[in-house]
Amino acid sequence: MSSAASAAIFADLLEQYNVDPFPEQNVETEPEPEDDPEGKPDEVYPECWQCKFRNRVFHTQDSDAESEYDERHPTYENIRDRYGDDVCQRQLAAHEFASMPDVWLQIMLTDTLCQGKPALNFDDADGKLWFRFPVARMRRLRDDPAHTEHVQHTSDVLHTWDFRPVHRTANDTFVCYHAVSLHNLVNGHPKAPGSTGILKDGGMHYGIQHGDGIGVYMYSYFPAFMHDCVVELEVLPYLTTLEGGSKGRYVMKSNQDESSIGAPCNTVLVRAFYTRYDVTPNWLKVPPVGRQVFDSGIVPLFSAHSSVQ
């Protein structure tokens, strides 16, 4: 993508989230309190447009309602002098927005991201670390009689590639995974005519006739070996085992009518997506820094070893 196109995406993002990248940077001080024996006024720091922007990008989950960046904070020099390099590095990592790859700028433009956290794929012999982003504003899960008449049976249990059972959740659904290129989160896939990208579309679309039929193909386990992005799905228990290929693969079939090709699949809900931790932009994975960082002391940098869940 050209630098002009990148600049246009950047401008669209700032306009969408109503953030001025060139705010007044006047640093004010409050009047010296009369009862302060040391006569030391409290500092009022300038508003940081990138932290303000970050607070608007991420949808807030109920469990993380307090997770926000402080929109007014000291300069890097003040942070380093008062709290050391760890906090300063963390703050610097939170200000790399303008240099992010184009595809991530497009992902933010979808207005679907929630604050993410690391997730280790325990099936991966190499111990690769992944980063999980929950997503919001996706199509709701519901039965779709117009396109599920072809389903032969209801699945009671799935199996992974090594025959471990995968049971239904408390919602009577299954959690499965779909391997895809990061590019296709915000761009259409050639096997799903009419799609504009999973996040833009608000969910999955039925693909073209191939393999075991028209449908949405998925894994019952986390396919860490596939592509640079894995989408987490919650699916109704209407899955069909693939007749050939690797074990642990399933398809949510349509009614197999040609009219279903490219149609939204409402029996599959997109819950989150995963990207490799080492290639995820720091601006998106550094945890929020609140005012308590500057009031109560050092908050250590994110530790991949202590924070994996």
Image (spheres, rainbow, N blue to C red):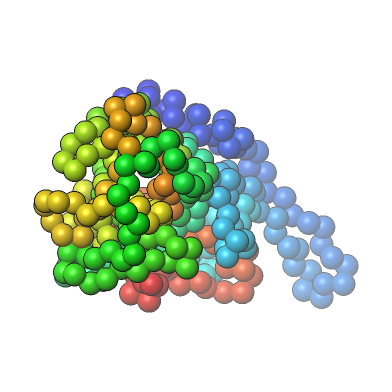
Taking the spot 44% from the left edge, 30% from the top edge, the residue there is 9
Q: Is residue 88 left or right of residue 72?
A: left
Instruction: Locate the N terminus by quadrant.
Output: top left
Q: Could you tell me residue 41's position as x and y percent?
A: 75, 63
Quadrant for residue 67, please give it: bottom right
Residue 99 in sight: no
Q: Is residue 2 above or below residue 131?
A: above
Q: Is residue 71 above or below residue 7?
A: below
Q: Could you tell me residue 6's position as x and y percent?
A: 38, 29
Instruction: Locate the C terminus by quadrant.
Output: bottom left
Q: Could you tell me residue 210's position as x and y percent?
A: 18, 36
Quadrant for residue 182, please give it: top left
Taking the spot 19% from the left edge, 70% from the top edge, the residue there is 163
Residue nearer the viewer, 227 or 29? 227
Residue found at the very far left of the displayed protein: 245
Q: Could you tell me residue 19's position as x and y percent?
A: 60, 37
